[in-house]
Image (tube, grey):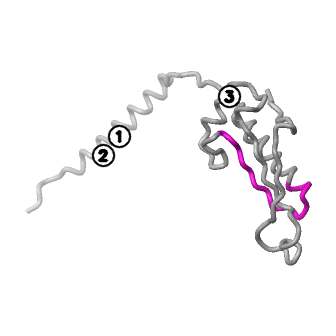
Amino acid sequence: MRHVVAASEVEWQAIRAQGPGGQNVNKVSNAVHLRFDIAASSLPEAVKHQLLKTADQRISSAGVVVIKAQSARSLAANKAEALARLQKLVDAAGHTPKRRKPTKPTAASRQRRLQAKGLRSSLKALRGGAPRE
């Protein structure tokens, strides 16, 4: 099940972007910092716990996700990109992997394995030969 992050739970801060862009980059705040407090969010407890357990450098020790988006030249596009990255992080935390069913090797595969072992053993036994002087 997909857990959508509410826009009211996200805090935005417009900042100046780094990198190329000429004069525009020096005078316009187009980059954005997204802050999302995991503990105060409306996400289910299991997803919150999984998010806090995730080893991601974007999650601070206080349990706040900080995402910086600056690739686009417009503030709206950077906001959308940051929100998409947060949603991807939440989706990954909410996903539970399928349980593996333990299986046993078939009789034929066991027989093939033992034949290969015997072949390798006999090949190595031929290497012995007479001792060298």
Q: Quadrant of the N terminus?
A: top right
Q: Marks 3/1: CA distance?
A: 44 Å
> In the image, what residue occupies the spot 81% across and 65% down?
16
Cβ atoms at labels 2 and 1 below 8 Å apart? yes
Percent coordinates x, y for residue 5 in the rendering: 82, 36
Secondary structure at numbered mark 1: helix
Q: Residues within 10 Å of mark 3 (few under 14, many from 20)?
A: few
Q: Marks 2/1: CA distance?
A: 6 Å
Who comes first in sequence, dot 3 or dot 2?
3
Percent coordinates x, y for residue 115 in the rendering: 39, 34
> In the image, what residue occupies the spot 69% across and 34% down?
93
Tag 3 residue: 96
Q: Choose between 29 and 98: the one closer to the eye.
A: 29
Tag 1 residue: 119
**At label 1, which amino acid type do we have?**
Leu
| Residue 35 circle label | none
Q: Residues within 10 Å of mark 1 (few under 14, many from 20)?
A: few
Cβ atoms at labels 3 and 1 below 8 Å apart? no
| Range of magenta residues | 63-78
Residue 6, by quadrant, is top right
Who comes first in sequence, dot 3 or dot 1?
3
